Amino acid sequence: MKRILVLLSLFVFTAGCSLEPPAWSQSGGAGDDDNVVIGVSISTLNNPFFVTLKDGIEATAEEKGYEVKVVDAQDDSAKQVNDIADLMQQGIDYLVVNPTDSAAISSSVESANGSDIPVITLDRSVESGEVAAFIASDNVAGGEMGAAFIVDQLGEGAKVAELEGVPGASATRERGEGFTNVAKESLDVVTSQTANFNRSEGLNVTQNILQANPDIEAIFSHNDEMALGAVEAAPDDVLVVGFDGSEDALNSIENGALDATVAQQPDLMGETAIDAVEKLENGEDVEDEIKVELMLETQE
Amino acid sequence: MNSKLTLNTMIDRFLPIVGLTLLVVVITIMNQQFLSPDNLLNLLRQVSINGLIAFGMTFVILTGGIDLSVGSILAFSSAMTALIITSGVDPIFAMLLGSVVGLVAGAVNGLLVTAGGMAPFIATLATMTIYRGATLVVTDGNPITGLGDSLLFQLFGKGYFFGIPVPAVTMLITFVILYIILNKTVFGRETYAIGGNETAAALSGIKVNRRKIMIYALSGLMSAIAGIILASRLDSAQPTAGETYELDAIAAVVLGGTSLMGGKGRIVGTLIGVLIIGVLNNGLNLVGVSSFYQQIIKGLVIVVAVLIDRKNK
């Protein structure tokens, strides 16, 4: 008797388990009315770059008469997964997502695929799930651009420190890769340390680096926020190169503090995303991977 | 005198649920989609992480302590679980080991507070950065992916049990167990006694230190379970997972009417507090409130709740 009970409860337990949501709960999904609603999930709005990106999306969408709903993940992957689930509750037609992490957001992309909502990723890719288009700056080329500028200004073999972004983030890897491509041949990279894409950490880490290596001639930073922190810590003769081309960085270059930045064009990136939505809406093809151009902004 | 006291207790007990109901009504008026079955399931899944952490936190706060290291323990246990899985060990065994990691990390907090005589705020502030650093060391700062497709592990964060998300089921079962422990056992009575008056509790023969170590270990275990759910749900262990989660957990406990001074409070209140925060997060997204205002509103709700609570005492 006991054994039968155990077997029975085991059976009930396994029968009740599933990876699919129950059929009676499928009330969300794609909207059915005429106007196009685009759900936008941004990794963090605590960084001017992503705010400009968001502004680019909103401005272009308004031009084309699309409705946009924006959520901010505050750099927390778990919150982003929740945010995207919330967006899908509101009957969005397209999902534009700037992932906090490429692995963590995969399940959200898959569930959007399940509801037939096309997904466009911005700035970072995802590991699995079907993406209609991945739009990003050519980060490797940008890293090379930054290193080449340092060689150009200081000559070969200059002593350089590298401020790295959030470890493991694709921007960190690609910018680092591009930088290393040029630097390993023609620069002396004294140290590479992370300051997590953050300005105050950039300041602290740079102070520490300069304490240990006072003869550093240049600093290459994986983003502008860290570079602007570095500028505060470094003496004037140290060449500081940022990455992103944020408004603060451009102002700083104008004031003669920051030496250069490899400028991304976040507004153009946002515009490209909405252009891709328009193409999909008209039934046209879009490229899987769209590279947005970079520009080196210097004091000249 | 006596009847006034009961009235106050009544208000104490029903205030959180009244607040939750009010919130649900307001959000539903602004967006009917909120009450759809699909969204309610979505909501239940979303609150389960904070729920588990907040239940453990309730015990800690009832003793008059605090645990700031929960988010770091979550990240550390989830990273250890992921590492053990990727090294080829059976996921069920890896999940158990990951839970033990959380339990031990919590017990260390308990030892620092009792044997070390440190203030809980300082002890767990220190271990918060220690465990976060340890997480970064073992993961090398990168997310750990490739956790395989073991059905049980996948079910733990992403699955459904008779239509209800498994994390929510885990949270509810845990809630029932902890409710019984807190309200029907010696352990529970002693938890309240320690928070009410530690010296008196010790004099009446309660092994205060041993109890406290067990309670911090419980809090660590809850964070570890939350961490494993998160790893399954995100298909990866994130080294930065759980940052600032201690704040949401503490907020849920306080919203539920538990006193930060210890000795007074209920775990049912914490469950309601968890739901209030979950409804705020989900509802404000659904209503389309800008994320900047969302943070202000969440803070204001906590301020108002605590102010009303204080007025009653």
Image (spheres, rainbow, N blue to C red):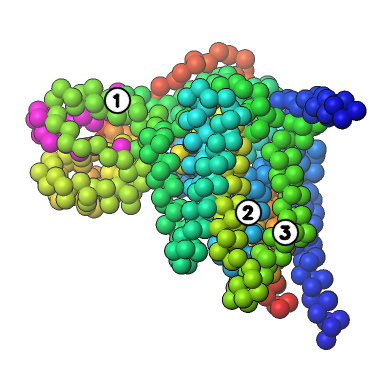
| Secondary element at tag 3 | helix
Image coordinates of residue A16 in percent, x first then y, are 80, 28
Q: Residue at x 46, y 18 (%)?
A: A289
From which residue to which does the magenta span run? A141-164
Image coordinates of residue A209 in percent, x first then y, are 20, 46
On the same chain, marks 2 and 1? The answer is no
Residue furthest to the right: A1
| Secondary element at tag 1 | helix
Q: Which residue is mark 3?
A: B182
Q: Which residue is mark 1?
A: A177
Q: Nearer the viewer, residue B262 or B199?
A: B199
Image coordinates of residue B31 in percent, x first then y, are 76, 45
What's the residue type where badge 1 is placed? Answer: Glu
Tell me if residue A203 comes above or below residue A221 in the rendering: below
Query: Mark 3: few, some, or many residues within 10 Å (few <14, many ≥20)?
Result: many
Tell me if residue B28 comes above or below residue B200 in the rendering: above
What's the residue type where badge 2 is placed? Answer: Gly
Instruction: Give the position of the C terminus of chain A as an image quadrant.
Output: top left
Q: Nearer the viewer, residue A112 or A248?
A: A112
Residue B98 in view, yes or no: yes
